[in-house]
């Protein structure tokens, strides 16, 4: 495995995954995966279909239970916890395919995302922040989610996750099914959320060009294992990555 030494101050590490192994029946989808993300950082995880990227996010989010390994948020182990408790710890996931509620309005979808919060004033404040971030959602509050365009549904899915006031956002293939123009807009919004809200982001993305462009560091996942890791600027120049994922 190709590694590049990263200076990780323990006080600045938000989430740490160590030697994570996850399986589906007898098949192991992840083998000893280790990675971490610092407070306020964007990292990307790139790899081919079936490499285990979505499984990694689902395991961090508590949807999948690991066979072994640890996941620590703020130094506290969270692996195996119920998904709702993981959400309350400050982690929110935007799943592949968006999975909004099509028969609920935009406003109702957003309200569901705020279920971890008991402070009504905080809910209201975050609601206005989400609408400021996604003005198109403000124009469509009473529309059913299923009537939105693909890009608007992605905005709604991200907005719903933000309603829980997370410190870590897990994004699974946010560009899936979107045009290049809308993809560029979504990625600009991801950078804005990271910069303005200081939310750390783990980005799983097939579009390696875009993922490496907006992330500080990156991990390459192949057949369930991390094979390359380091600064995104360096990984973009790695011949193996260029040949396998960048197509140039």
Image: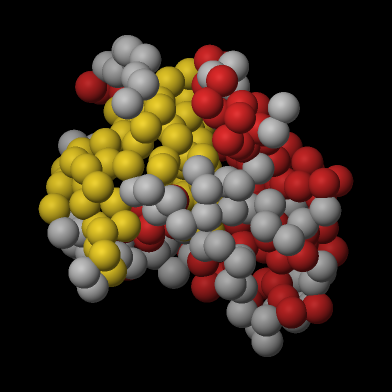
Q: Residue furthest bottom?
A: 103
Residue 112 in picture, x, y percent from top left: 52, 73
Coloration of the structure image = secondary structure
Task: Name the residue rendered at 61%, 30% in the picture.
Answer: 243
State left or right for residue 19 relative to residue 38. left
Residue 191 in picture, x, y percent from top left: 64, 34
Q: Nearer the viewer, residue 26 or 105?
A: 26
Q: Nearer the viewer, residue 85 or 232?
A: 232
> Where 68 falls versus 116 (above or below)?
above
Task: Name the residue rendered at 59%, 17% in the picture.
Answer: 237
> Where 206 falls versus 81 (above or below)?
above
Residue 86: quarter of image = bottom left
Residue 183 in view in this figure: yes
Residue 88 in view in this figure: no
> Where 114 falls versus 35 (above or below)?
below
Residue 74 in picture, x, y percent from top left: 24, 37
> Where 113 falls versus 34 (above or below)?
below
Task: Name the residue rendered at 72%, 27% in the picture.
Answer: 248
Task: Name the residue rendered at 32%, 26% in the picture.
Answer: 1
Q: Nearer the viewer, residue 226 or 104?
A: 226
Q: How many marks?
A: 0
Residue 43 in picture, x, y percent from top left: 48, 33
């Amino acid at each position: 495995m190709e590694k590049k030494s990263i200076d990780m101050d323990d006080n600045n590490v938000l989430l740490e995954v160590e030697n994570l192994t996850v399986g589906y029946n007898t098949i192991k989808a992840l083998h000893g995966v280790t990675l971490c993300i610092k407070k306020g950082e964007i990292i990307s995880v790139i790899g081919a279909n079936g490499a285990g990227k979505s499984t990694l996010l689902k395991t961090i989010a508590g949807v999948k239970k690991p066979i072994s390994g640890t996941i620590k948020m703020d130094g506290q182990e969270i692996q195996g916890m119920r998904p709702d408790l993981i959400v309350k710890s400050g982690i929110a996931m935007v799943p592949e395919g968006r999975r909004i509620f099509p028969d609920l309005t935009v406003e109702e979808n957003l309200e569901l995302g705020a279920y971890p919060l008991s402070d009504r004033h905080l809910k209201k404040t975050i609601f206005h922040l989400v609408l400021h971030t996604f003005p198109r959602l403000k124009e469509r509050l009473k529309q059913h989610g299923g009537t939105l365009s693909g890009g608007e549904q992605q905005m709604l899915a991200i907005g719903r996750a933000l309603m829980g006031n997370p410190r870590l956002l897990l994004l699974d293939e946010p560009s899936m099914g979107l045009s290049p123009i809308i993809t560029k807009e979504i990625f600009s919004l991801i950078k804005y959320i990271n910069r303005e809200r200081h939310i750390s982001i783990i980005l799983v993305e097939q579009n390696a060009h875009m993922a490496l462009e907006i992330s500080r560091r990156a991990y390459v996942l192949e057949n369930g294992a991390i094979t390359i890791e380091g600064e995104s600027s360096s990984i973009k120049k790695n011949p193996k990555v260029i040949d396998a994922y960048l197509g140039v």
